[in-house]
Image: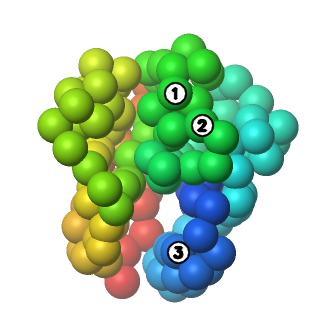
């Protein structure tokens, strides 16, 4: 059975690389992007996967980008991460249907729990088990 693809959108190469290594160590398939535009060019509506999205991207916030996609997306649960969060961002994320809101640095266990939860929330998808160590 194929593992779900986890998309990572973050402009920080080190963050993307470390998240990719972590998730691949759990047997997940990962595609990473340095910008929202790169991800948008790749994503096709209805793909049943999971998106880890940074809030602070060049040219657009993660939430503005998510809003432009027509959130909430039932097939693409979103985990929003930020290094500079506040109540307004958390509240807007909740209104847009974000699955999880995580502040950096993110503990591995907390991220994996958020991914499991996000994948369980997908609607109209075949449920692949989330790999665990």
**Residue at 26% across / 50% down in the picture?**
85
As measured in the structure, the alpha-carbon distance from the residue carrying label 2 to the one carrying label 1 is: 6 Å
Check if mark 2's residue and mark 1's residue have beta carbons within 8 Å. yes
Residue furthest to the right: 41
Residue in the foreground of this view, choosing between 130 and 73: 73
Whichever of callouts 3 and 2 sits on the residue coming sooner in the sequence is: 3
Q: In the rendered image, is residue 1 in sight?
A: no
Q: Looking at this view, is 15 or 111 the one in front?
A: 15
| Mark nearer the viewer, 1 or 3 | 1
Q: Is residue 17 visible?
A: yes
Label 2 crowd (10 A; few <14 / some 14-19 / many >=20): some
Vertical order, 2 against 27 (above or below): above
Q: Could you tell me which quadrant the N terminus lies in? A: bottom right
- 1 or 3: tag closer to the N-terminus: 3
Q: Residue at x 36, y 22 (%)?
A: 96
The label number, if any, that marks residue 60 in the structure image = 2
Quarter of the image for the C terminus: give it: bottom left
Q: Look at the numbered disc 2 and give the secondary structure of its residue.
A: strand
Q: Give how far apart the Cα atoms at labels 3 and 2 are.
A: 18 Å
Q: Residue 12's x, y, as percent?
A: 59, 70
Q: As displayed, is residue 8 above or below residue 107?
A: above
Residue annotated with mark 3? 15
Q: Secondary structure at mark 1?
A: helix
Image mark for residue 64: 1
Number of residues whose C-alpha sits closer than 10 Å to that of mark 3, classed few (under 14), some (14–19) or many (20 or more)? some
In space, the residues marked 1 and 3 are separated at their CA atoms by 21 Å
47 with respect to 123 (left or right) = right
């Amino acid at each position: 059975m194929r593992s779900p693809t986890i998309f990572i959108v973050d402009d920080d190469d080190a963050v993307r690389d470390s998240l990719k290594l972590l998730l691949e160590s759990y047997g997940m398939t990962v595609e990473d992007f340095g910008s929202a535009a790169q991800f948008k060019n790749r994503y096709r509506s209805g793909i049943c996967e999971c998106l880890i999205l940074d809030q602070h991207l060049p040219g657009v916030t993660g939430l503005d980008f998510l809003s432009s996609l027509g959130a909430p997306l039932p097939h693409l649960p979103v985990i929003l991460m930020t290094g500079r969060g506040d109540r307004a961002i958390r509240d807007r994320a909740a209104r847009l249907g974000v699955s999880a809101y995580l502040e950096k640095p993110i503990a591995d266990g907390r991220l994996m729990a958020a991914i499991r939860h996000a994948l369980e929330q997908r609607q109209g998808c075949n449920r692949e088990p989330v790999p665990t160590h």
